[in-house]
Image (cartoon, helix red, strand yellow):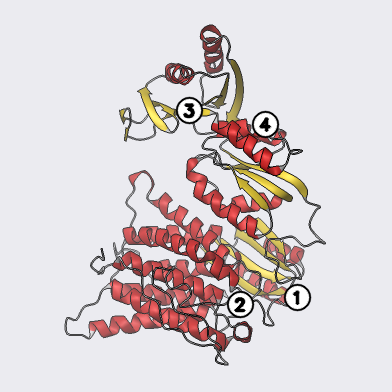
Amino acid sequence: MPKVPETFFDAPAVRAWCALALDALGRAREEIDAINVYPVPDGDTGTNLYLTLESAAAGVEQAFADGARPSLPEVMRAMAHGALVGARGNSGTICAQLLRGMAEGLDDKAPHADADALCAALRRAADSAWEAVARPVEGTVLSVASAAAVAATAASAASAASADGGGDCGAVVRAAYEGACEALARTPGQLESLGRAGVVDAGGRGLVAVLGALVEALTGERPSASPVTRPAGGTPVGPAVGANDAYGADACAAGHGHGGDDGDGDGPGYEVVYLLDGSDDEAVARLRERLDALGDSLVVVGGDGLWNVHVHVDDAGAAVEAGIEAGRPHRIRITHFAGDQGVRRGAPSLESAPEPVRRAVVAVLPGEGLAALCAEAGAATVLAPPGRPPTAGELLDAVRAAHAREVVLLPNDDELRRTAVTAAEQARAEGIRVALIPTRAAVQGIAALAVHQPERSFDEDVVSMTSAAGATRFAEVAVADRQAWTMAGICQPGDVLGMVEGDVALIGSDVTEVALDVLERMLSAGGELVTLVLDDTAPAALAATLESHVHDHHLAVDTVVHHGGAQGAPLLIGVE
């Protein structure tokens, strides 16, 4: 049911907004990719925005971890920082700066923001984004952001002048959304490339989805679709749709052409993106000047010791060298723009890409030991230390880096399922055949990799690996870091937890005793092979004790021991 519009914008509202925005961009991603014309027609704006918001959402959830109750400024800074470190492409980088500007526009001491304060934050967001772009252009996401701020301010002023003399944040964000939709509809008349293709700006379309999520977070209702307008020349932008289609997905934008004089092959050949620290404002200002002379689509966002740099250049090495002179560039990504506009960004050119192999396996592992083990078996690995799960963008990068026509993806964690699905979908859109095997634990991934045979057909190999993973029951022995309710009762910090198939089965005080109990429970249902993966914190005699127990009580069962490194749990168990 619709809820009463919120008078205030607070930390829980930011958390809800971030989750809803990620969901909205997930639904609209393909449509936004399809209308991506400016500045380069590479069909990835929706994906880049989704991956940026995914990183922002991770930052917000981290702020609420362990029962924390962050303030509004704290959670907005967490959202902005998450977007900054995970920003993808031109659109994602600008989105990160919009969030940073919004955080800067809030009163650092206020527990919540009223309608006027929210308007101020939206104005600061738009202004900061314009400032971050070296050569800002009308008819882009910048115009849409400014229009949203202006509309919100006008609505707040009108509400304050009304008979009740008050306003609510719900009314303000509705006005911002409507103003953004109107500005979006004007973009084909402001940029020749958009008008020629008959589409609205893709980055602006993404911002409309994010603002629609803010409306839903503060009112409990998805906004209704806006009237359809026509680009210059009278070509219809598209038909209206209902409010349930990703906040008017086709009402605010439609069309699937790629064209215009932007990105027609005459522009820079590379996109260079990196994070920069160890610098200061003066050095970053000099970096802006140098990069602006090297290429175009320059956006530098951030501050307070960390910046995200995005530029399109012909000399990628010079762009990185400029970063080295300014500070310490890291997480450097260089992407070659293929001459064919139909090829998505991220797809290597024929001239620069290594010859692809037939098949690869990409596996997510919690510790260095397991990662090394799987790498020796031929898998490309993504390290996921405890508390630091990989983003969809990082998984996508790993799939791309495998340079294979066929990829088997092993997430090895239930909580990574959605992330892996997003990465797989984007990789498939780039022409890579990807099979996602829903492994729930690292020991299932090990079992799947053990039967991997690249000489078989892809389908046969995937079926065999899936069967091996599914036939592997898993458990772990972990140490509780806080009080919590479990299936076995209440645990306290320091308690040893025996977890079977993801559920706490027993609570104890000694790692070895709990491990023996869990192992016996697992083998009571049968098994032929036990896999033990020990953390660096496991007792020195644990492996020998468990091997001896299996030998003495289950003669027909073999045991394999691996050392996983800092995997977060003293022991992982697999039984096949």
Q: In the rendered structure, are the residues bearing label 4 and label 2 in contact, judged by CB atoms less than 8 Å apart?
A: no
The type of residue carrying mark 2 is Ala
Choose top left, top right, bottom left or bottom right for residue 120.
bottom left
Question: Residue 75 appears at what percent x and percent y?
Answer: 39, 58
Task: Answer few, some or many: residues within 10 Å of disc 4's Cα (few below 14, many 20 plus, some between 14 and 19).
Answer: some
Task: Answer few, some or many: residues within 10 Å of disc 2's Cα (few below 14, many 20 plus, some between 14 and 19).
Answer: some
The residue closer to the viewer here, 29 or 6, is 29
Q: How many marks?
A: 4
Q: In the rendered structure, are the residues bearing label 3 and label 4 in contact, judged by CB atoms less than 8 Å apart?
A: no
Q: Residue at x 51, y 75 (%)?
A: 204
Mark 1 or mark 3: whose residue is earlier in sequence? 1
Mark 2 or mark 1: whose residue is earlier in sequence? 2
Mark 3 or mark 2: whose residue is earlier in sequence? 2
Q: Label 4 to label 1, Cα distance in Å?
A: 45 Å
Mark 4 or mark 1: whose residue is earlier in sequence? 1
Q: Label 2 to label 1, Cα distance in Å?
A: 22 Å
Residue labelled with disc 4: 451
Q: Residue at x 56, y 24 (%)?
A: 576
Vertical placement of residue 7 versus 72, above or below: below
Task: Answer few, some or many: residues within 10 Å of disc 3's Cα (few below 14, many 20 plus, some between 14 and 19).
Answer: many
Choose top left, top right, bottom left or bottom right for residue 162.
bottom left
Residue labelled with disc 1: 265
Residue labelled with disc 2: 134
- Camera-nearest label, 3 or 2: 3
The type of residue carrying mark 1 is Gly
Q: In the rendered structure, are the residues bearing label 3 and label 2 in contact, judged by CB atoms less than 8 Å apart?
A: no
Q: In the rendered structure, are the residues bearing label 4 and label 1 in contact, judged by CB atoms less than 8 Å apart?
A: no
Residue labelled with disc 3: 475
Vertical placement of residue 178 versus 66, above or below: below
Q: Residue at x 53, y 35 (%)?
A: 441
The residue closer to the viewer here, 75 or 92, is 92
